[in-house]
Image: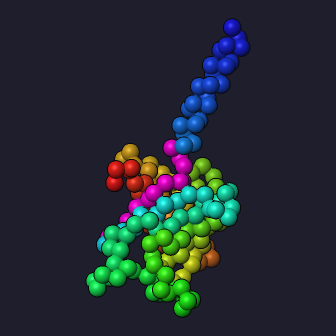
Amino acid sequence: MKNNTFLRGLVAGFVFFGVTFSHASLEGVWRTQKSEKNADIKIEKCQDNPNTFCGKIVALQEPTYPDGTPKVDKHNKDASKQSRPLLGLELISGFKAGGDKEWDDGKIYNPEDGDVYDCTIRMYNEGGEDKLEVRGYVGVPLFGKSQTWVRKKSQD
């Protein structure tokens, strides 16, 4: 009887923590919140290092210029990369779990200025929605900027 109670508790613990951990997963598609420049970023484990997370642009609210040509990485400091399309571009890389619902040691690329910044990510839930506070900075997080990204629901 004691073993049966212990086993039930163990199974209940796995179920509870399994739900909790999967709910707090960084993996998924996130919508940036930047007025007319919204983008969807797919975050998943990096191919070259499965202990870290990377994210690429999978959709843009405005994927083309007014003339109909696809938007490209025109502000990149490396001229050879200025013609690559923004769709499919890796935006974040190298994030490691740093604590409960926190990831750090990552980098974020800003296609608006062509610079790469140090970055941290913190997940929280507000109003039943998973959100990310994505903070890019130079040197010290105190001197940076944050954006809020919202997890996309599958039907969005």
Q: Is residue 118 within the magenta segment?
A: no
Q: Quadrant of residue 8?
A: top right
Residue 143 in sight from this viewpoint: no
Give the camera-side residue of 151 and 155.
155
Magenta residues, start to end: 23-35
Q: What residue is shown at x 53% (from left), y 37% (from top)?
A: 19
| Nearest to the observer: residue 81 or residue 77 | 81
Residue that extends furthest to the right in the rendered view of this protein: 3
Q: Position of residue 117 (x, y in %)?
A: 57, 76
Q: Quadrant of the C terminus?
A: bottom left
Residue at figure coordinates x 49%, y 87% from the top left: 82
Identify the residue at the far front of this view. 69
- Please tell me in which quadrant of the rendered image residue 78 appears: bottom right
Nearer to me, 102 or 10: 10
Q: Looking at the image, is 14 positioned above or below residue 48?
A: above
Q: Residue at x 55, y 68 (%)?
A: 92
Give the percent coordinates (x, y) of residue 70.
38, 79
Q: Spot the residue most to the left.
A: 66
Query: Is 94 placed left or right of 127 in the picture?
Result: right
